[in-house]
Structures are given as C-alpha cells and as structure tokens.
Image (cartoon, grey):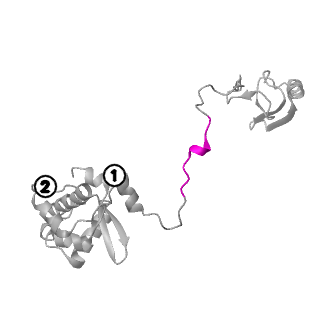
Amino acid sequence: MQDLHGYIRYRFRSDDDDVDVLLEGEADWVRSIVSELGLSKVGWAMPMAVDSTSLSNSGFASDISMPEEKPKDMGPEPDPSRIPVIRRPIGELDLAAKLVEVGLEQPIRPTADQLREQLQDIEEPQPAQGPMVKDPMAEAWLKELLRIAVRNHGVTAITTETIALAASDYLGDREGMELELFLEAMFRSGKLVKVHGGDNTGWGPSPAWLASGL
C-alpha cells in the first residue's frame, strides 16, 4: 500500500473475528487510518482513480510507461483516393461469374451414374468397426460413396434418392424408407450430417467419421 497514491480503496475482512473494514479515500488518509487500526500488515488495497499507480493482484505496484510518440514503422499514410469505388444496383452481382474470375468454379453436383461408376473403380473397403455399427459393409461402402462426393466433386451432401440410385446394392439393397431409417440412425450416431433443402434431404459425412479408419 505504501506504493499507492491518489484515490484508493482498502479492504480487510476476517470472518473468524466478524471484522469487515472498507476504506476509500486519498492514499495518505487511508494509510493513516489503517495504521491507527493496527491493520498495516493485513488486508489489501487497490487504486481507484484513473491516474493512480497500477496495482497487480499481488499488491505490488507496476509502472506502465505509455509511449509518448507514434511508432516509426506505421507505413505510409492512407490514401482514400486509391481505394476503388464500385457501385452497382442491389441484386445485380453475379457471384458465380466473380468466383470463376478468381479461379473458384462452382462445384457441379454429380449424377448417380457418375458416383456409381467411380464407386465401382475402388477396391472393396474394410468392414466398419465399433459398437454402434449395425451393418459393417454397408457403412464402409457408404463412407466411400460420400468420400467420392466430397473429394472428387466438392459437394458436402447428396440426396437420399442419389444414394439409392448410386449404391443401393452396396448398402444391403436398402431403398425408400429402409434407406432413410439407415441414414437417420447413422446421423443420430454422429457419423452423418443432415441437410434440409426444399423437398429433399441431403446427407453428408461428418469430418471426424470420414477421416477415421473405423
């Protein structure tokens, strides 16, 4: 507390002795009262005025020197005239064309035939493992199908109908409601993500499941 100046607060509390002392005021006045009470070696104090010496939690003052001059490496002064001004009516931005200009083409959603053809070209995967697995080979083939959709075509989800047309026989001949229930169960176990869009529901792999070897 000896290092403090300006307006400060002193606090001492002892639950055992039922003592609670709170003093606020100029540092010299607070120190004198604390000394009269015999509390110089207990309690804690902190600055309250904006110009007071900063105090850490340990009770020791710390000197913080603020730079008086601007840093030398600020770079050139900003020139607003060099910032291009682009005005267009709301809704007239062709986002797809702009993406193509910078080399980011919009992904083209694959057809079921394309997915099936690429699925036929890969080796048979190892059966899925784990306590939540109901059909090891069906889950393994579904992972490969969704891996193709994500990595080869850049889409994050494909519809139930596309999955059925591309890989129904790989998924235990599941289709319709049976396939929906199979996908829903994998969604609930955290292996798939569900995407709602219009009349169709899309299914995509969760990143952790796709990257895992299970």
Decide if residue 145 is on the left or right side of residue 70.
left
Displayed quadrant of residue 157: bottom left
Q: Which mark is residue 75?
A: none
Closest to the observer, 177 or 104: 104
Dot 1, crowdedness within 10 Å: few (<14), some or many (≥20)? few
Q: Amino acid at mark 1?
A: Gly
Q: Residue furthest front?
A: 81
Q: Which mark is residue 125?
A: 2
Image coordinates for residue 185, horizontal then vertical, percent: 28, 67
Q: Chief secondary structure of the magenta span?
A: loop
Dot 2, crowdedness within 10 Å: few (<14), some or many (≥20)? few
Residue 81 within the segment the image draws in magenta: yes
- In the image, residue 45 sits, relative to residue 94, either above or below, namely above
- Would you say the residues marked 2 and 1 are in contact, meaning their CB atoms lie under 8 Å apart? no
Give the magenta part as a residue range.
77-86
Tag 1 residue: 103
Residue occupying image coordinates x 34% and y 66%: 194
Displayed quadrant of residue 137: bottom left
Image coordinates for residue 55, horizontal then vertical, percent: 72, 28
Residue 70 within the segment the image draws in magenta: no
Q: Amino acid at mark 2?
A: Pro
Q: Look at discs 2 and 1 and give the one toward the viewer.
A: 1
Image coordinates for residue 202, horizontal then vertical, percent: 31, 69
How many numbered markers are drawn? 2
Image coordinates for residue 189, horizontal then vertical, percent: 31, 62
Query: Of marks 2 and 1, which one's residue comes earlier in the chain?
Result: 1
Closest to the observer, 6 or 108: 108
Q: Secondary structure at mark 1?
A: loop
Q: Quadrant of the N terminus?
A: top right
